[in-house]
């Protein structure tokens, strides 16, 4: 007998088809809105039409009088239970239902719970709210201006609209580097708001059972255990009496990490009415009130030596957080991991100054396919790098190569204190340049220019930190960041695996089984993977920041190894030899001196329940909690070529080459799917996705006719390549991949268009690069800003 064939059993490296797709492609997924409970009521939210206004009074009497209405909740009802405000994940407070003022358009003002959703909606419209309009603020410049109205007058000690001033790095050292520079390259950038817009909006069904005192909440959350802890603390309910179930999720992309007022209101309503209460957000509700990302302004400077070396970097970032600071991010860092910028470059000095401000916009800064502001960090980095190469008159690929951290320079400490541990940056760049035919394209571009055609090539190279924690440095509201896996091997050798992560479409049911197959030699199809139910899953911090593979995936490997260690003892017993004489090959233990004498892992499983050695605890199950020693640092190189039409400003992608190094790939097909999805989102952000605010604070882009999702029709083709540098500290050498392409991609598109416009004088066009913006740049040679307009005049 020989070891099982790993690829055949669907182990690591197998492009195994996604098991979850069995139900998804048949339309048999089980989303929150699919769940129907006996006696269930429906909740709708009344939202503010104004961005900034004092609430003088709310008259809900007409709503109460409507047949089928069971409950109307207002700020006042909530305040009576101390629930009008809730804590955010960033130590701020957020209104659940407005009491004093509304602070953004779309803010939750009242909820109606009724027999069906239509009655609830009609009743919302019957509520009369008397507003006294106040001047709205839609951008930070306005917010910081003298005499700007105070947005958060609810907070004691808040006398202006500043949320935080935060600083990291070496200010003096960086100043010295700039003093020694041959050239200083400067650029002003704005990463506009964007929205994750998952296909399924947010929703919850709260079901409080008075007779058992148990509260069950089915909800669209990426982090069920954090929600359970939050409900226990905020609602002061005993934790064992709270069960959070996150069923199938129709995409999360970061939208489903925070706690939203709708969840809280549905829970309170169920407790008051003692009936299940369902809240399902509509598309506009989702787009205007939940999950906004980005919205950071940057003044960036690079200190450069003539030979191309970067001596220092200065970043001054201003983040527009909207009315409440509700970012989900590690507590220590006010502007997320913005200071992971430039981690792939060997730079001696760096300084970051960050300021967060309130505006009359929906809470923003929630990560969207972005490991805590890393998307902004890498976009700024790569836009600054390209501008610097242009300022030096240096080839943009060469400029990157000269400054890369070298392969023999790991572990490498970045000037902002991160430790990167592995990578082959130049190799990835070379693979990319070779694939795109770099030198040929440069010639083609020159030729085309002679005939008035504008071609451009954009590069984006970056390493990003994925997989928080370790628990020493990363926590959310004091809860340390680690993760878990629990593995139960049944008598017949079939298994049940549960983790503290929660897939939203990433394919965990497929890939986790592959890790177990790799470690134990059990066929992947024999392993059932479950996530998302706090009554059954081991405690974990959920899925975001591409942390599942780095942390929960590592726990899956570790729990499998614990099982193997016990199975080895059982094998020794079955083979009647001492444990030291037992050898392992995939799926089987054997006698060292007699390799043909062995027992399979399945035989060990059976023995664990029927023939265990004397004194051994029966059964074959275990749990592992994994606290990673470091983040994982995947690397990516994205190269885009474009042609810009000088007459219209329209630009087309000619080619896109992606080289990703996420370490060892568990399932290459799923990894490629993640990359393609991310590149599609990157293209959308660069080209078409526009969600902003007018001077009155009205949200523009509040539906899918205005906020565009790219289809297969618009999306360019992708050419994917790989490099593999195993992660040195991850048990199976894997690094995260879920966000790389969305993080690194946007700069490649913008850099390509800016390269086509080189020589016009324009240094930057803010995303999305609409044709009219590109056209304006071609006409004026000036930068084109996408910042929301400042309102002239009074309210
Ligand atoms: N994988 C692999 N080999 C690797 C790394 C990952 O085979 N070396 C596989 C994993 O096992 C997993 C998938 O690729 O099945 C993504 O893994 P990972 O990088 O660990 O990311 P997470 O599972 O933690 O997913 C989170 C990440 C984030 S933060 C956002 S946002 C995002 C993304 O995933 N949201 C998504 N991709 C998404 N894809 C879908 N379909 N839907 C979303 O909401
Ligand atoms: Cu950053 S969006 Mo994902 O981390 O859920």
Image (spheres, rainbow, N blue to C red):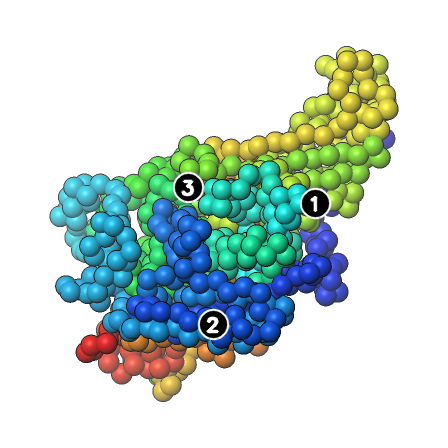
At horizontal 66% and vertical 45% (from top left) the residue drawn is: 211
Q: Is residue 753 above or below residue 370?
A: below
At horizontal 78% and vertical 43% (from top left) the residue drawn is: 526
Q: Which residue is mark 1?
A: 529
Q: Dot 3: within a 10 Å radius of its alpha carbon, few (fewer than 14), some, or many (20 or more) residues?
A: some
Q: Which residue is mark 3?
A: 477
Disc 2 and disc 1: Cα gap in Å? 50 Å
> Which image quarter: residue 761?
bottom left
Q: Dot 1: within a 10 Å radius of its alpha carbon, few (fewer than 14), some, or many (20 or more) residues?
A: many
Query: Looking at this view, is 164 or 82 the one in front?
Result: 82
Q: Is residue 560 above or below residue 508?
A: above
Q: Is residue 568 above or below residue 541?
A: above
> Which image quarter: residue 391?
bottom left
SS at mark 3 in the image: loop
Q: Which residue is mark 2?
A: 61
At horizontal 63% and vertical 57% (from top left) the residue drawn is: 276
């Amino acid at each position: 007998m020989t070891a099982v064939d790993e690829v055949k059993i669907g182990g690591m490296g197998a492009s195994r088809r996604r098991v979850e797709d069995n139900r998804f492609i048949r339309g048999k997924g089980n989303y929150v809105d699919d769940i129907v409970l006996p006696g269930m009521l429906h909740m709708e939210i009344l939202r503010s039409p104004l961005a900034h206004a004092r609430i003088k009074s709310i008259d809900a009497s007409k709503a109460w009088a409507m047949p089928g209405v069971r409950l109307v909740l207002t700020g006042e009802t909530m305040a009576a239970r101390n629930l009008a405000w809730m804590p955010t994940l960033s130590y701020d407070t957020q209104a659940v239902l407005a009491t004093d003022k509304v602070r953004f358009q779309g803010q939750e003002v009242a909820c109606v719970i009724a027999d069906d959703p239509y009655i609830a909606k009609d009743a919302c419209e019957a509520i009369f709210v008397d507003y006294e309009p106040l001047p709205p603020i839609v951008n930070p410049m306005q917010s910081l201006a003298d005499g700007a109205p105070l947005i958060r007058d609810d907070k004691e000690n808040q006398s202006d609209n500043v949320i935080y001033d935060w600083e990291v790095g070496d200010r003096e050292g960086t100043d010295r580097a700039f003093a020694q520079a041959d050239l200083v390259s400067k650029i002003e950038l704005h990463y506009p708001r964007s929205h994750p817009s998952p296909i399924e909006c947010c929703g919850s069904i709260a079901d409080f059972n008075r007779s058992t005192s148990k509260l069950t909440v089915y909800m669209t959350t990426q982090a069920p255990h954090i929600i359970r802890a939050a409900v226990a603390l905020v609602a002061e309910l005993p934790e064992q009496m709270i069960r959070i179930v996150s069923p199938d999720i129709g995409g999360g992309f970061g939208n489903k990490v925070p706690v939203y007022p709708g969840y809280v209101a549905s829970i309170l309503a169920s407790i008051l009415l003692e009936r299940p209460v369902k809240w399902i957000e509509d598309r506009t509700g989702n787009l205007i009130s939940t999950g906004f990302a980005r919205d950071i302004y940057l003044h960036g400077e690079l200190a450069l030596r003539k030979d191309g070396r970067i001596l220092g970097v200065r970043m001054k970032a201003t983040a527009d957080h909207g009315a409440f600071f509700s970012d989900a991010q590690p507590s220590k860092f006010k502007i997320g991991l913005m200071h992971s910028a430039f981690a792939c470059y060997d730079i001696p000095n760096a300084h970051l100054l960050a300021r967060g401000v309130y505006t009359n916009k929906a809470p923003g800064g929630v990560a969207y396919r972005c490991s805590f502001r890393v998307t902004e960090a890498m976009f700024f980095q790569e836009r600054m790098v390209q501008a610097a190469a242009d300022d030096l008159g240096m080839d943009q690929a060469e400029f990157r190569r000269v400054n890369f951290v070298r392969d023999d320079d790991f572990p490498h400490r970045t000037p902002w204190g991160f430790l990167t541990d592995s990578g082959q940056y130049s190799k990835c760049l070379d693979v990319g340049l070779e694939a795109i035919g770099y030198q040929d394209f440069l010639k083609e571009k020159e030729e085309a220019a002679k005939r008035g055609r504008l071609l451009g090539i954009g590069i984006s190279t970056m390493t990003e930190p994925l997989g928080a924690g370790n628990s020493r440095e990363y926590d959310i509201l004091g809860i340390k960041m680690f993760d878990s896996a629990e593995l139960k091997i049944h008598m017949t050798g079939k298994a049940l695996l549960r983790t503290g992560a929660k897939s939203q479409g990433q394919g965990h049911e497929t890939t986790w089984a592959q890790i177990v197959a790799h470690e134990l030699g059990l066929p992947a199809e024999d392993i059932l993977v479950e996530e998302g139910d706090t009554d059954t899953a081991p405690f974990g911090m959920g899925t975001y920041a591409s942390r599942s593979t780095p942390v929960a995936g590592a726990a899956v490997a570790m729990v499998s190894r614990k099982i193997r260690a016990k199975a080895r003892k059982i094998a020794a017993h079955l083979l009647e030899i001492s444990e030291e004489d037992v050898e392992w090959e995939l799926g089987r233990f054997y006698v060292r001196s007699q390799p043909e004498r062995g027992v399979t892992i399945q035989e060990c499983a059976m023995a664990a329940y029927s023939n265990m050695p004397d004194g051994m605890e029966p059964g074959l199950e275990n749990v592992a909690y994994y606290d990673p020693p470091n983040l994982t640092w995947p690397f990516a190189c994205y190269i885009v070529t474009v042609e810009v039409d000088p007459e219209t400003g329209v630009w087309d992608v000619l080619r896109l080459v992606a080289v990703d190094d996420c370490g060892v790939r568990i399932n290459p097909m799923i990894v490629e799917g993640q990359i393609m999805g991310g590149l599609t989102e990157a293209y959308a952000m660069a080209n078409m996705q526009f969600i902003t605010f007018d001077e009155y604070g009205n949200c523009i882009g509040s539906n899918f006719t205005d906020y565009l999702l790219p289809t297969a029709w618009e999306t360019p083709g992708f050419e994917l390549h790989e490099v593999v540098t195993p992660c040195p500290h991850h048990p199976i050498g894997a690094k995260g991949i879920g966000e790389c392409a969305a993080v690194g991609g946007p700069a490649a598109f913008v850099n390509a268009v800016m390269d086509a416009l080189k020589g016009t004088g324009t240094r930057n066009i803010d995303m999305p690069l609409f044709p009219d913006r590109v056209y304006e740049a071609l006409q004026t040679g000036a930068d084109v800003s996408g910042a929301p307009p400042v309102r002239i005049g009074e309210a």
